[in-house]
Amino acid sequence: MKRKMLVLCVVLSLAAVAFGQDANAPDSNRQDLSILQARPEPPMLGLHWARGFTPDARAAKLRGNSPNMTYHGGLIMPSTVSEAIFWGPQWANSSFVGDKITGLDSWYTGFSNSNYAKTSDEYTGSNGQVGPSVSHNGHVIDTSTAANGSSTSAIVAEVCKEISNPVSNGYYPVYVDGKRGNAGYCAYHTFGSCGGVTVQVAFFFNLDGDAGCDPQDTSRLHSQGLAALANVSGHELSEARTDPDSPGAWYDRRGQENGDKCAWTFNVPLVTFSNGSEWKIQGEWSNNAFNTGTGYPNSSGQRGCLDGH
């Protein structure tokens, strides 16, 4: 969720903000944290709300209007170069790491050119069409104490510190070892500048044992923590590709991006990626699927979600 709910004060929990949403606020008002903070902050975009904090439950006044996303004039990502950052001292602890680092490297590699990635290919921008190709450059580990995500500029600064040669189509997810506590969200994406290069950034909490951010994968192919991170990673990467930064590209009249509109909805037990890895992962919104009645329903019953299974 993007615009009406993105004026966040760092001294308040996201849970309290979520329940204060005004469904009548202007849909084009792309707000950011700088209004309530002394220094400018990149906005938190595409917040992946935890279970129980779904903004759809408070959107009754918007019913009867098209749920489709519309184009707002910005750029998209025709291709993507990804590199993950694992931040925090626990990433040096093998028992904490488990299968998470190797699993996420496999996830990003398999996402490229998968049918799941292709669910976003219908969207175009001023710089071309969203493409399914992701070149994954692996990961880096920083065992210093991680930020908690409340400051987006701190997450961007970590990316600029750890990525030696950022690229303009770069997507740099930051996975910290800290739990979300009272925050009402599991992850978000944002953007920033490293050495004059605009990059896409995402932030993820440690979701081990976190029922509010758990897709409830029963396949036993992955640990619970990895399965949870994989699901929210699909949400954020898909949104970054279709709506990367200011002034924004694709979102609906409530500010929701393609991941937001299908959050916590699963069409099949597992989706197979291009490298053969399998994941329980939410769908992504497709205008085409909704218009033709070929998608599966989101939490509001709108048949516009696709997972490429």
Image (cartoon, rainbow, N blue to C red):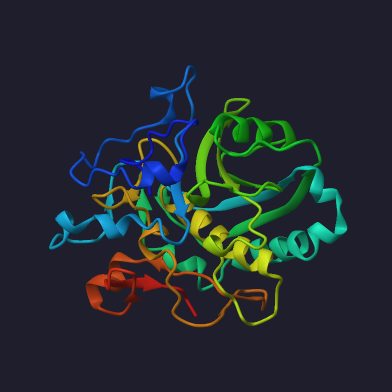
Residue in view at x 42 percent, y 71 percent: 265
The reply, left or right, for residue 98 in relation to residue 22 is right
Q: Is residue 91 visible?
A: yes
Residue in view at x 68 percent, y 56 percent: 136
Q: Quadrant of residue 74?
A: top left
Q: Nearer the viewer, residue 235 or 209?
A: 209
Q: Residue farthest to the top?
A: 38
Up the image or down, 236 lies above or below 162; here it is below
The x and y percentages for residue 190 are 50, 40
The x and y percentages for residue 45 are 44, 44
Q: Nearer the viewer, residue 24 or 119?
A: 24
The reply, left or right, for residue 130 in relation to residue 139 is left
Q: Nearer the viewer, residue 213 or 304?
A: 213
Up the image or down, 40 lies above or below 52; here it is above
Q: Quadrant of residue 29?
A: top left
The x and y percentages for residue 93 are 86, 53
